[in-house]
Amino acid sequence: MGAASTNQHSPEQAPGRRAGGNGLQRWFPFVVLLVVAIYGLLAAFLGQQASSLVGDTAIAEPDLPVMAWKSFVTGMLVFALLLNLSIVIRLRRPGLAWLSVLMVGVIYSQLVMDGLGLWLIWPGIPELNALLSVSLPLCLIALCEFTPHFIAVGRQGARLLRGFSLAAGLHLLAAPFPIGPLGQDVFLVVAATGGMFIFGLVLGQIRKHVYARYFALSVLAILVGALTTSLTTIGWLPVNPLTDSAFFLGAAAGSLILTSGVGRLLLEERKRRLSADIRAREEQALRARIEQDYDRVLKTHRVTGKPNRPMLEEALTAIDSRQTPYTLCMVRLTRFNELEQALGYRSAEELLRQYLRKMNRFLKQALGEQLIPINGYAIATLDTVNHAFALRRSPNQPELETRALSAITDWLSGNFRDGRFSFSWAASLGLAHAPEHGTDAGSLLSAAGFASLNSDNALSVYDPSIAEWQYRQQILMLDVEDTLNSGDMWLEYQPKVSIRDGRISSVEALLRWEHSEFGRIPPDQWIPLAEEVGIIHQVTRWVLDRACRDASGLRARYGDHIAISVNISAKDLAHPLFAEQARAILRRHHLLPRNIILEITETAMMTDPELARHTIEILSDMGFRIALDDFGSGHSSLGTLALFRLDELKIDRSFLHNVLDYPARQKILKAALELGTALDLDVVVEGVEEEAIAVWLQQFPGLQGQGYYWGQPARASLESTGAPLPSHVSDH
C-alpha cells in the first residue's frame, strides 16, 4: 500500500500508460479470453475432468424459482458485459476490457456450477464444463490486470499485481495436468491473497480517488462471496440457494459495481469532451472576435474610427486614374493641437470624432456620385490633424468639381458648434489631381499634404515648384547633422569696430554652409526650419564649440582682449540644460564666460518671456555677456529692455535706411542710441556699409559699428582672413 501512494495519477491518466503499443497489446484481454477458451476446450477433449469444485456434472432437474432469479442476475451481468464493451469502444481504452473478461469468467463459472449451462445452453456437450478449471484463474488474472487501468497504482503495486496475475496464469496452464503444487487449494490461497492485496491497495486511496471507492466496494463484495462459499463448503454455514451461490452473487455484485464505476468514467469523459468542445467553440468565437478587432484596427484609425491610411491607399489603388481622373483632398485641421493643449487630449479627441462624423455626412450629401467611398466612409484619417477624401472628376463638366469644392470650403470655414463649444478648426484644403500630380496613392498623398501646408489660402492646389522647395528643405534638415562634421559648415567672424578710433573689441561668429547639391545656403533659409524641427540646439552647441576652438586664432589676429559673439535661439533658452552645456564647452577649451557674448533676438526673448528671463539670469550669473540683437525690429523693444538683464544693445540695420536724407529718422536713431547709453549698455549699430554713414555716426561717443564698411567676414586664422582691413581700422 505504501507503494501505491507513489507515482499517483488519475484513472483518466492511468490507462494511457498501459494502453499504448500495437494492436495486439491494445486488445490483449480479448486475445487472452480466446486463447483460454481454446486451451480449456483442448483440455476437456483430452479427457481431463473438472476439479472437485464442480462435482458431478450430471445435473438434476434445477429448481425453477432459484434458476429464475439466478438467470435474472446472469442477464444483468450479460447486460453489464455488453455495456462495458461499448464503454471500452467509446473511450478507446482497451485496458478496461479486462472487466469484461472478469464478467465472462463469472458468468461461465456460475453456469457450470449451477448446471444451468449444461441444462439450457450447451446440453449434450458436458465437455464444456471442463472450462471451469481455467475460468476461475482467468477471473483472478482479469481482476489483477484491470486494477491499474481503473485506479492509480504505484510501480511496486503494479509489480505485485503482475505477480498474482502470473501465478494465476500458471494455475490456468496447469489445469489439464495433475501437478501437485498447483492444485486447487494452492489456487484458493493465491486468489484470497490477491483479493486481499487488491482490497488493501484500494483502501489506501479511498479518500483520494472516487474510483477507489467503487473498486473497494466491488472487491469487498467478491471477498464476502468467496468467504461465504468457503464457510459453506467446510460446513460452518448451512447450505441453501443463497450460500451455495454466494461467490456468484458476490462476483456479480462486484462486476456490476465496477461497471457502474466505468460508466461514471464514461460520463466524466463525455463531460470533459463536452467542456473541451465548449472551450474550443469559445476559443473559436474569441479568435473570430480578435480577428475582427484586429481587422478593424488594421483598417481604422485608433482615435477617429475612420478608415486609416492603408485603407485609403487601397481604395485609391483600385482606381485607374488614367481611365477615371480624380482629385485627392487633404483636410488639415491646424488648430487641433491648440485644442488638445487647452482642453486635454480626451476632450479634443471626442470633439474631433464628432466633427468628422458631421463632415462624413456632409461630404456624402455634397459629393453624391462624385465621392470615392473608402470602406463605406467618405473620409479617411491619416492622423489627428490630417484627413483625406477623394472625388471623381469629369473632364467634360469641370464646373461640378468647382461647385463641390466651393461648398466644401465654405463648410470647412464655418465654426464648429457642439454644446457650449463654438470655434473654428482653421482647416486648410490641399488638392492633388490624378494622374497629373501622380498615379500612385503615395505620391498623391504627399502632393496633397504639401498643398495643405499653405495656411494662407483655404484651398490650395499642389504646385510642383513648391514641392521642390519643400524637398530642398527636407534634404537640408536631413543633412544638417552630417554637415556639422563634414567641413561643409564653418564660421566666419565679423568685427565690431569702435567708430571713433577703429579699435576692435569683439567679433560675431557667423555660420556659413556650402551644400554639396544646393551651393551656398544663407542662414535665414534654414535656421528657422531647424528651430521648428528641433535640431537648432545641436547647431548652437556646435557653433559655440567651434567659436571656442577658433579663439586662439582670433586672439592672435585681434589681441587677447577679443570677445566672441554667438547667436542663440528661443529653443536654446527653453532648453533646461543649455546653461550648463555652454559652461562645460568653455571649460573644455579653457575659456571664461566673460569671453563670450550671447546674442539673442527680441523675438526669441518674447516667445516665452518668463522662461527666457530666468535662463538669461542664470547665464549672466555665470559670467556670460548678453546682447539684445536686432533691436527695433520687434514690437515691444522698450519692455524688453526693462525686463531682461543685458550688457549690449545691437541697433537693427533698418534704422540706417535713408538716415542721412530724413531728419526724422536721425532723431529716432539718436533716441535709440541715447536709450542704450542711459541704460549703461554697449551700443552697436548693425549694417554700416557706407563711409558717409560711418562718419556721421562718429558724433556719438562710445558707439560701435558692424558692417561691410570695415571688411567682409573672415575665418579665424591669419591665413584665411582674406583682404586686409581698411586703413581706418585698427587691429588693437
Image: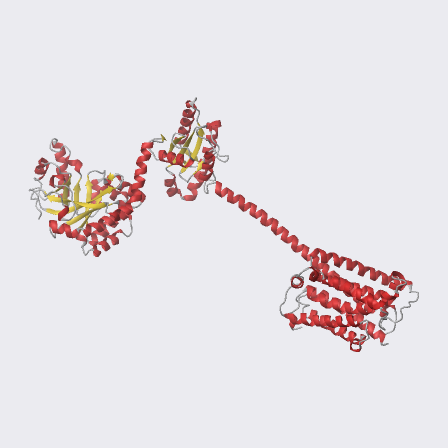
Which quadrant holds the N terminus? bottom right
Across and down, in percent, residue 665 comes to 14, 33
Residue 705 sits above or below residue 74 on the image: above
555 and 694: which is toward the camera: 555
Counting from the top left corner in percent of width and height, residue 197 is at 72, 72
Residue nearest the viewer, comparing 70 with 338: 70
Residue 364 seen in this snapshot: yes
The image quadrant that residue 430 belongs to is top left
Residue 355's x, y, as percent?
Answer: 44, 36
- Residue 142 horizontal side relative to residue 532, left or right: right
- Farthest residue, direction top: 396
Choose top left, top right, bottom left or bottom right for residue 99: bottom right
Q: Taking the image as drawn, is residue 252 in sight?
A: no
| Quarter occupied by residue 402 | top left
Residue 236 position (above or below residue 213): below
Give the color scheme: rainbow, by chain, secondary structure or one colour. secondary structure
Q: Residue furthest bottom?
A: 180
Image coordinates of residue 659 in percent, x first then y, are 13, 33
Q: Residue at x 80, y 59 (%)?
A: 78
Please state if 220 lies on the left or on the right of 382 as rendered.
right
Q: Residue furthest right?
A: 61
Q: Is residue 544 above or below residue 81?
A: above
